[in-house]
Each structure stands twice: as C-alpha cells, then as structure tokens.
Image (cartoon, rainbow, N blue to C red):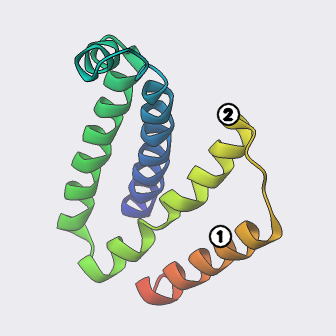
Amino acid sequence: MLPYSLIFLMTVMGAVASMFLKQASGSLKGGSAAESVLNLLKAPDLYVGGILYLLASFLNIYVLRILDYSSVLPLSAFTYVWTMFLARLRFGEKLTGRKAAGVFLVIIGAVLVSGVY
C-alpha cells in the first residue's frame, strides 16, 4: 500500500509544482528578455515549484524500484487530474463537461493500464 500512497503524493506534488511555476511565469514582465529572466529568478514561486518537482522526481525514482514501470507510469497520469482541480481552485478556470469527461477517461485508462484494480 505504501508505494501507491507515494504515487499519490508524487502526482499531487507534481501538480502543485506546476501551479507554482505558472504563478512564477507572471513575473516574466519586463522590457527586455534579460529583465524578464531576472524578474523570474527573483520569483519565490520558481524555487518552490522547482523544489517540489525535484522531490516528486525522487519519489518517482524510489517507487520505480518497488513497482513495475508499466504500473507506475500510467498512474503518474493522475497528475493531470489534480492539475485540473488546482486550476479551478487557484486560477478560477472553468471545469467543463469535456474536461470532466477527459479526467474520467484518464482515471479509467490509468487504472486499466497499470493493473491496479
């Protein structure tokens, strides 16, 4: 059960990392490319997102030692599920029927391909 808990944590961390990187992208304002890059490097969200991605990657490596690659990789698609919910909560993006159907298909596909049922 622990490996699947770690996969859950890994996918949530990946989605939250993406959210922070999106927030950091808002600092890419400036007259020149150099000024935009400097503003980005000053954004704390860049570092939080980067650290979360790094930690999620380490979890992924650890879980791959325990479970089959063909099980772990499909389950990593759950990152897209969490991303959609975070986009709704944090950025106010609309949750359409099409997106909900896509998330449903991702969940069904990940479970079927990974063999976790």
Any mark on residue 90, and which?
A: 2
| Image location of residue 116, percent across then percent down | 48, 81
Identified at 75% across, 38% down, the residue is 92
Q: Quadrant of residue 69?
A: bottom left
Quarter of the image with the C terminus is: bottom right
Identified at 68% across, 49% down, the residue is 85
Q: Quadrant of residue 68?
A: bottom left
Amino acid of disc 2: Arg
Determine whether label 2 and label 1 are within 8 Å by CB: no
| Image location of residue 96, percent across then percent down | 80, 63
| Image location of residue 62, percent across then percent down | 21, 55
Q: How crowded is the residue under tag 1: few (<14 C-alpha within 10 Å), some, or many (20+)?
A: some
Q: Is residue 18 left or right of residue 107?
A: left
Name of the residue lying farthest toward the right:
97
Viewer-side residue, 111 vs 105: 105
- Relative to 4, say whether 22 is above or below: above
User: Visible in this render: residue 117?
Assistant: no
Q: Secondary structure at mark 1?
A: helix
Identified at 50% across, 28% down, the residue is 23
- Relative to 88, say whether 116 is above or below: below
Q: Is residue 40 left or right of residue 97?
A: left
Viewer-side residue, 87 vs 113: 87
Q: Secondary structure at mark 2?
A: helix
Any mark on residue 103, and which?
A: 1
- Relative to 54, say whether 33 is above or below: above
